Image (cartoon, rainbow, N blue to C red):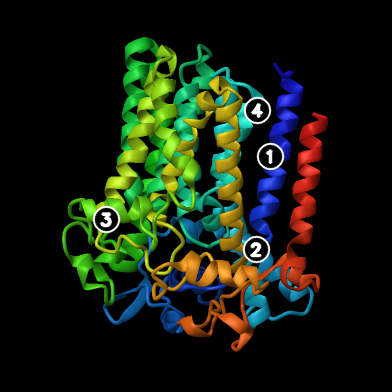
Amino acid sequence: MASPLRARRTGWVLVIVLFGSYAYFYQAGGWNQNSRFAMVRAVLERHTLQIDAYQLHTGDKALFEGHYYSDKPPGTSLMVIPPVAVARIISEAVGVDPGSFQGIAWTSYVAAVTSAGLFTVLAAWLVYMLGLRWGFSVGAALFAATAYGVTGPAWSYATLFMSHGVTAGCLMAAFYARSRMAERDEARRGMMAALLGASTGWAVVTELQAAIPAIVIVLLALQEEFRCRRATFVKVATALVIPGAACALIMFAYNTLAFHSPFHLGYASEEGFEQLRTGFFGITRPEWWRVKEILVGEYRGILPLFPLLILAPIGLVMLATDRPRRMDAGLALFVGIYYLVLNASYFYWEGGWSYAPRQVTPALPFMALGFLPLWDVAQRPLRALLMAGWIWGVAVTLVAVSTNPQPPSTYKAPMRQLLWPAFRDGDLSLNHQTFVHGSAVPDQMRGHTIPHAAWNLGEVAGLKGHASLVPLGLLWIAGIAALWWL
């Protein structure tokens, strides 16, 4: 058993290496992220929520009473306004116009790093911390955290200014807070209740689909508090409700300012995408053919890209055999099933230009908890299998983040047809759509016939092709050396 000091230092190494791996890549624009960033620019540059001046940059927009707005829930955009404002000041200080291509690349990079990047790191770190708190080895906790952080789609979406990484971090923070509310110290329980309220509230402000798991986590926490500690229930419940209500007020205020009603969502005024008008904004009922495509299809299937995931439910069932962890295991499995059913019920299940089925991304840290018991009970052959799956996932995901984690929907087998051939040839950072362009040309991503807008830090330093990944490799080697020393 590692000492607490070594366990903490191992956690810091994990955080540094993951954050460096996410911040190493800038993936440039796309409809989803351009819509969110248009709102950020509108607030900072024009002091309005209307994105009329930027509406040609994206197809993801709402048209209401003659004005354009982002169709996305506002959480991810709102949270990056302060860091982007600072980035704009830095840009001006070094003589770069924040509205120029270079200035927008810098500020949008900061937006992605301080939202999806940071919150994906948070989710991975919480997987690690939960593993230690539940009595698993440091090795098991580290394996589970990195299996989530770098062997699957989470790494891809940590480099994009989208909501999935933020939602995953918020829901994991809520899950962690609920587990800590069992502590005897009343002040600590109150702090965890406040964290639970804030994290579930912000998860919903960021991504509406998070409402169901958020409600379930909150209700379980309140039920456990009422059953075990009735004397302090009102105080703890108040600590939970206040920050959650504050997040709801932010959402209602945004909807009212933009659409004149606290309950009018941007998706209700979506321009185009007619199927969003069926069911609940395109969500109807799950289809088995979608489940198959989501899991094993060559177009968006997650298991060929993240094969370790197939073992996660087995691990969660094993975790449930430990009575104190039964509720945690059941809750994690519920979140995984919920997002699979949600994705299979959505008309636009494939996610447009995306890597793997992106709607299931917030469930991945919950599924990664299943790797904890698998690692600790595994004998040498099973550990070798786990490591083989880990290596495969890292390699495949590195191919995606190095080339383009937004492969055009015209590629029906994106890894085989686009991503791997480009990586093999050293043709990296393929995306040429900036945050001020409304589209990219799928068949002109290779060969740099159109200047690429995406980059990695090695390319910024002047390195080309595979050589541009050497600094990232050195970071990983340093991290492995530090872990070996610890």
The x and y percentages for residue 41 are: 53, 73
Q: Tell me if label 1 and label 4 are in contact, CB under 8 Å.
A: no
Mark 4 against mark 2, which lies toward the viewer? 4
Quarter location, residue 445: bottom right
Mark 2 crowd level (few <14, some 14–19, many ≥20, 10 Å Cα): many
- Type of amino acid under label 1: Leu
Query: Can residue 126 be seen from the camera position used here?
Result: no
- Type of amino acid under label 2: Phe
Gap in Å between the C-alphas at discs 2 and 1? Answer: 18 Å
Say above or below: 371 vs 158: above
Identify the mark nearer the N-term, 4 or 2.
Answer: 2
Q: Which residue is mark 2?
A: 25
Quarter location, residue 251: bottom left
Gap in Å between the C-alphas at discs 4 and 3? Answer: 36 Å
Q: Which residue is mark 1?
A: 14
Q: Tell me if label 2 and label 1 are in contact, CB under 8 Å.
A: no
Residue closest to the far bottom: 449
Say above or below: 236 vs 26: above
Q: Which residue is mark 4?
A: 139
